[in-house]
Image (tube, grey):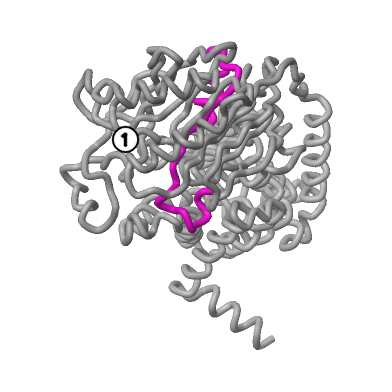
Amino acid sequence: MRSTRSFGRLRDSPWPRSGAAALAGALPVLAFPAPALWWFAYVALVPWIALARTAPTGRRAALDGWCGGLGFMLAVHHWLLPSLHVFIFLIAALLGALWAPWGWLVRRFLGGTPSPGRASAALLVLPSAWLAVELVRSWQGLGGPWGMLGSTQWQVGPALRLASVGGVWLLSFLVVAVNVALTVLISVRASRVPAVASLIATAAATSAAYAWAPRADVDGRARIAVVQPGVYDGPEQRFAREESLTRQLAGRDVDLIVWGESSVGHDLGDRPDLARRIAALSRQTGAEVLVNVDARRSDRPGIYKSSVLVGPDGPTGDRYDKMRLVPFGEYIPARALLGWATSVGKAAGEDRHRGTEQVVMDAGRLRTGPLVCFETAFPDMGRHLTEDGADVLLGQSATSSFQHSWAPEQHASLAALRAAETGRPMVHATLTGVSAVYGPDGERVGPWLGTGASAAQVYDVPLAHGVTPYVRHGDWPVGGALLVLAVLGVTEGVRTLRPRRTGPEPLVPRARTARESPARPVR
């Protein structure tokens, strides 16, 4: 009894409660790489939901949502702390506010002793509200969709099948729905029937989608090599190592060679000697080389990050300029206002310039769709490249600044989801690891190249050309979630505007007085 009273006091105290909410919001990080406890995602939100539903007021529940969102953003992006320093706390606080309405909705539908109908509605509304949060923070200007809850399922076969149906969005919806159902099952006895029914329905829907979703039919293979040089201090030393590793691929019958992000530190127009050296490698290996140039362009002002295809005669003319830049890492939003960030962290001293459109390149018999760095986190970019005819998706990345953190593993895992969503294999090539390749069903192909590797690895990549439901129908789970929230908004608005009765309506006609009774009519 004493422990119960102590918990109640802790729960109702503002500061301890806020700390508990932040800690509860941070728990899902264990489901992401490097821990990669994928199963934990299905229970990780239960403490956060249980706390918000017991909030004494709607305002306090919204604050629980905010504090939990702050904890979630800090935990998932903790590896940015050495680069952004105190700025990461400001960013986490701003983005954490997106979960404030979610916290309010948790109390609205699960607070007190919810009826079975209200608990059933929560199983639809709360996952929809979570998707709305992921949609807003997926905007590139707010940092992009890194740490979407559904991406914790990157190594689960049935989940990858579901990704081919509704993308990572569908996975996020289902993970949150299971967490809500478990919270109801544990905390609300009166509503256990809809909670159990929801879990059974989720399992049935997952099984049906697994059985119904078209499988990737392999119709060819390609030999693609990844060149990972490892950690080097300068661009010249790195280039020399990449050159040496690429020479080792001669005679190995490769179709394409992929270097990582920023693998070339000079524009090839300014350094024709580098272009000639890469062309010589292409002739020696019999394969075109996709490099990534991080430099000031010779033909236009500004610094670009560009995927450039080089053949035996030099650059082929195929070039993709990175479109979605990393806030603070590659540009500073509102630099006039926030430029001071360069003095407290490793923020960009000069803004990179953006490309204007995605590009599908013809590399021999392969049509390739390049993505640069954290663009691999955006589901829509891989889908659009597939629609434009890409046979294989290529991610070029560099996570050397975060070499001893969870970032390299998290980044490499995203390629599995992009492959499963599109039904196209994906190659994730980095400078310093982790490099990885996934087949059109999202399953791993060959070994990972870890952060300690400096090697050239050839992968026998299966090819497929079917159209997944996700590519055909797009982000339909997001549309469904927004529809649910729109209906909720209209319903709440009607309920609020409905005139309230000042008193109870009489259930029977007004009783007559004795003078008005039939026995003694009024004269």
Task: Tell which of 317 and 192 is nearer to you.
Answer: 317
Dot 1 amino acid type: Gly
Where is mark 1, residue-wise? Answer: 265
- The image shows residue 203 at horizontal and vertical percentages of 81, 41
Residue 412 image-quadrant placement: top right
Q: Is residue 356 left or right of residue 111?
A: left
- The image shows residue 80 at horizontal and vertical percentages of 40, 54
Residue 428 image-quadrant placement: top right
The residue shown at (47%, 42%) is 229
Q: Secondary structure at mark 1?
A: loop
Residue 497 vs 338, above or below: the answer is above
Residue 7 vs 382, above or below: the answer is below
* Residue 514 visible in the snapshot: no
Screen quadrant of the C terminus: top right
* Residue 477 visible in the snapshot: yes
Task: Tell which of 198 and 459 is nearer to you.
Answer: 459
Reply yes or no: does residue 388 show up in magenta: yes
The residue shown at (50%, 54%) is 76
The residue shown at (78%, 61%) is 189
Task: Tell which of 2 and 437 is nearer to you.
Answer: 437
Which residue range is magenta in the image? 379-408
Q: Is residue 149 left or right of residue 279?
A: right
Q: Is residue 380 left or right of residue 170?
A: left
Question: Residue most toward the left?
Answer: 336
